Image (spheres, rainbow, N blue to C red):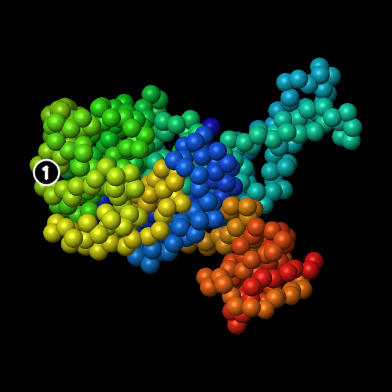
Amino acid sequence: MRVQQIKMGGGTKTGQNHEVDRARVVVIAGPGLGKMMGSMHPAGSLYERPTNINKVEEEMAGFRAVLEQSGVKVYDVREVLRWNTCVGHRVDLEEMAARCLTYELDRTSSYGMATDEKVLHYVGEEYKRHVIEEMSDGQLVNIIMTNPTVTLRESYRDTGFTARYSFDPLSNINFTRDQQITTRKGIVMGRLRSEQRRKEVDVLEFCHRKLGLEVIGRIPEPGFLEGGDFFPVGEHLCLIGVGPRSNLGACEYMMKNDLLGTSKVAVVKDEFELCQDRMHLDTVFNILDTDCCLMLQEMMGENSETRRMVDEYRRDSPDQEYYLARENIEFSQYITEQGFNIIPVSGEDQLKYGCNVLNLGNGLIIAVHKKTAREISRSPFFRGQIKLIEFRAITSMYGAVHCASQVVLRGDDDDDRVAKLPEIKPIARHEIMGGGDFGTRDDDAKPASCRLRVSGGRNTQPHGYAQKVYGRVRIPVSRTHVERDSLALPRVRFEDHQCLRLILYH
């Protein structure tokens, strides 16, 4: 599935010069139906361990709040997909959903069914587009996130056939670091190594173009490129990790097509370890300041059995080609040569995502591992501040805050570019069986009243949630009275905080 060259806005220039520059625009992806499906079998979905989707949603909400409080403009993938300001936006969303929805006949169907015009109509493109046109924006987003296949088979009663459903969910799309990189020149769409994640690139490219963000390239076969392997290090240098996920072919493609914008490209080779727990460069390394970085201690030094080696490519002017200038330099040596002081991270702390911090610029770091955060603060090389957030539900899926964000614009002088970007209203999600967009109110939904009985007692949920007693639904506080939408999900605010539960009467 290739993304359509959609008719969405011009091309706001994107890019980041250095990892320490001020982050202005960040793309994230909160959990939804695809993530809930992925949680059913963690190992098959590339997760490290089982996870609780309610907690994932809470942690992503907290992460977003920290970003916005720090002055970052945040876009959520699902919100961008749902955002419609004109017929063109809606048509483009329908087109993408149509490419994600498959109708087919069961292979065991009789010859008569396979040649029946009525049956063929119901697996045809015309019928599918008619169905899609009637769907809400939220339904279309769920189709994009789950890639359903509907298989018709004979039933011998009623309409004469019935349907079975299978799905190919985008269960890792919340790690928005990986589908692309943002270089000095702009956004380059990657190509993901894992089969489960290939379609995510199309979704993110669709979102970037819909926002009017300039996409300058896309990695073709046989290249592989994942965003966790890329770091911008100023006007003259960028780092690209190659190993379990990204490969040299992608690096060569970007150098040949001038997609990086630096005079030097350091290819950091993982040749001796190739471990899932250290799949990307950002799991073992990160940049805290122009002269300070984190690095996995056990991979440092020429004698390390898991050492990374660097090949440095250079070009003498922007109109010339890159050439291999140096090769097989031990990584910690190379980084020291670039003027960095290294704060070492133990193997145990690395596994707890000590290296996977997010630099928001101006010395502000978001971290998820308490011990590493404290060691950074104690270091004489670090001059900034650290915000520690809860992220354990998300790290269960093999990633932390750097993995769960894509900074598409950095810099202090980009106010005009940021101002041109659209304002998109956040989706107020209800958590249904682990989260998702099915619980989201459409903007045109009409509320209906319902009667309420509240049992007395002290409120044991001080964070603004009540519990619906006949279902596993946590209800966000948002109103001073009770309403329900088409999904019969209540909204209530308890002014006196003296309740334990509520019972609805329909």
Give the position of the C terminus as an image quadrant. bottom right
Q: From the viewer's perspective, tell me whether residue 418 is left or right of residue 301.
A: right
Q: From the viewer's perspective, tell me whether residue 397 is left or right of residue 315.
A: right
Position above or below: 70 against 45:
below
Question: How many numbered discs?
Answer: 1
- The residue closer to the viewer here, 323 or 196, is 196
Q: From the viewer's perspective, tell me whether residue 49 is left or right of residue 299.
A: right
- The residue closer to the viewer here, 274 or 287, is 274
Q: Residues within 10 Å of mark 1 (few under 14, many from 20)?
A: some
Q: Amino acid at mark 1?
A: Thr
Position above or below: 227 against 116:
below
Is residue 10 in sight in this rendering? no
Q: Position of residue 251 (x, y in %)?
A: 28, 31
Q: Position of residue 23 (x, y in %)?
A: 31, 57
Q: Residue at x 61, y 62 (%)?
A: 474
Position above or below: 65 against 249:
below
| Residue tagged 1 | 336
Report helix, strand or loop for mark 1.
helix
Q: Position of residue 43 (x, y in %)?
A: 49, 36
- Judged from this view, the residue extending furthest toward the bottom is 496
Corner quadrant of residue 495: bottom right
- Judged from this view, the residue extending furthest toward the top is 111
Q: Residue at x 62, y 36 (%)?
A: 167
Position above or below: 255 against 500:
above
Q: Residue at x 41, y 30 (%)?
A: 193
Corner quadrant of residue 390: bottom left
Q: Position of residue 262 (x, y in %)?
A: 21, 40
Is residue 501 in sight in this rendering? yes
Q: From the viewer's perspective, tell me whether residue 62 is left or right of residue 416.
A: right
Q: Residue at x 46, y 58 (%)?
A: 59
